[in-house]
Amino acid sequence: MNPVKINSDPFSLLSDELQKRDFSKLLVLTDENTQRDCFPMVKDALPAHFEELTIPAGEQYKTLETCVTIWDKMTAAALDRKALVINLGGGVLGDMGGFCASIYKRGIRFINMPTTLLSQVDASVGGKLGVDFHGLKNHLGVFNEPDIVLISPSFLDTLSAQEVRSGFAEIIKHGLIQDAAYFSGLNFENWKKNNWNALINRSVDIKKQVVQDDPKEQGLRKILNFGHTLGHALETYYLDSPKHLLHGEAIAVGMICEAWLSQQKTGLALHELEEISQKLIQVYGKINIDPAHWETILDLSLQDKKNEGKSVLFSLLESIGTCTYNIPVTREEMKQALTYYTHL
Ligand SMILES: NC(=O)c1ccc[n+]([C@@H]2O[C@H](COP(=O)([O-])OP(=O)(O)OC[C@H]3O[C@@H](n4cnc5c(N)ncnc54)[C@H](O)[C@@H]3O)[C@@H](O)[C@H]2O)c1
Ligand SMILES: O=C(O)C(=O)C[C@@H](O)[C@H](O)[C@H](O)COP(=O)(O)O
Ligand SMILES: [Zn+2]
């Protein structure tokens, strides 16, 4: 895997790396919020001449249409294959900017500078790139590594509490799948008081280790998808509704449902299921998933990328800190998991 650097000063992080690189042109991608809040923190590290494109913020813009805007800009700016792209933003911008760079002229280099907690602990690392298609999460994409990932926790100062909480879900996931002590050390009661710097370091380490073993998700990497089979189905279902869920909020619900499936199918102890549910509800509360919508939500799980043939394959916990994968789950069992969540 290419390097990941973590430093509180985003200016020196970027200027050091740019000085080491030979590039013909530079394109800085931002969204409307990171342009306002993050770009000023790094602009003095940039050369005198650079290209810039700001896209609208939000998951609903993680589409091929936005990619066309990005490719139009790359083309109009005459980027050649020695050009470099900087993705300055959250997971949406990083996934999409990396995808666009990977496709343009069969691939130009890009650097990820993640600016949300979620993208610092998860999305910027590991080379999963892509966009949603007909609302289906990351349905079009590639695996391709950024040249380097530059993480500065200082960016988090301007991030809303709701977005921080969304990123916390992926941290919780890392504990659940790989490190019971990490999970039990998290502060659920007063989640805003977590030491994000320390958590970014540990989460990046967990993710790096898994990705190094299985970069293209042939097996082990599927554990990073715990909570995502039902979580993504819910995120997609509510994407265009007033109930719109952030990625981490959807994954939090998915992790409760999939912990229930884990208790039924892969030996998760009942007291651990209860602990997981209680802690996640404490942080994320509960959403009302109308049973009239369940069939449509379950249909969406048929598109999950871990599936093979007609089987919907889940990543499930054996205990807190241990996860297994490729576990077939029936539609009826998925409904029972939603029933469990509803009655909490
Ligand atoms: N590739 C992967 O491995 C991977 C892993 C996890 C999630 N994801 C993807 O990541 C996406 C979610 O990422 P996200 O949660 O970062 O969402 P996001 O990119 O939409 O960012 C969330 C919001 O915060 C704003 N923002 C970003 N940085 C800011 C800052 N420092 N200050 C103020 N506002 C700021 C953005 O403009 C946006 O409105 C989803 O599409 C998900 O599928 C990918
Ligand atoms: O890196 C991975 O592998 C993950 O599964 C991390 C997830 O948190 C992330 O949401 C990822 O984008 C999901 O990938 P997908 O293959 O289910 O689209
Ligand atoms: Zn995720």
Image (tube, helix red, strand yellow):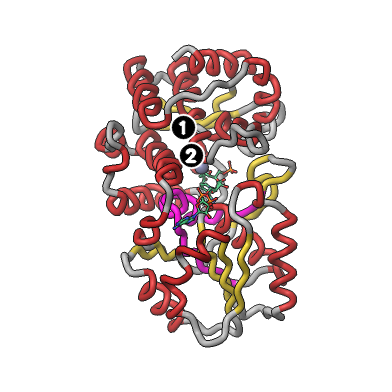
* Residue neighbourhood size for the residue with mark 2, other residues' Cα within 10 Å, grouped as few (<14), some (14–19), many (≥20): many
Q: Classify mark 2 as within 8 Å of ligand 1 or not, answering yes or no.
A: yes
For disc 1, the marked residue is 252
State the extent of the magenta-drawn residues as a range: 109-131
Is the residue 317 above or below the residue 78 in the image?
Answer: above
Which quadrant of the figure has residue 82?
Answer: bottom right
Percent x, y of residue 52: 60, 74
Q: CA distance from mark 2 to mark 1?
A: 6 Å
Would you place residue 147 above or below residue 224 in this image? below
Please name the amino acid that badge 2 sits on. Answer: Gly
Provide the secondary structure element on which disc 2 rests.
helix
Please give the residue where the numbered disc 2 appears in the rendered image.
248
Tell me if label 2 and label 1 are in contact, CB under 8 Å. Answer: yes
What residue type is disc 1 on? Ala
- Crowd tier of the residue under label 1, counting other residues whose Cα lies within 10 Å: few below 14, some 14–19, many 20 or above: many
Q: Residue at x 56, y 69 (%)?
A: 110
Q: Which residue is found at the position 62% from the left and 32% from the top?
A: 233
Q: Point out the residue furthest to the bottom here.
A: 48
Q: Secondary structure at mark 1?
A: helix
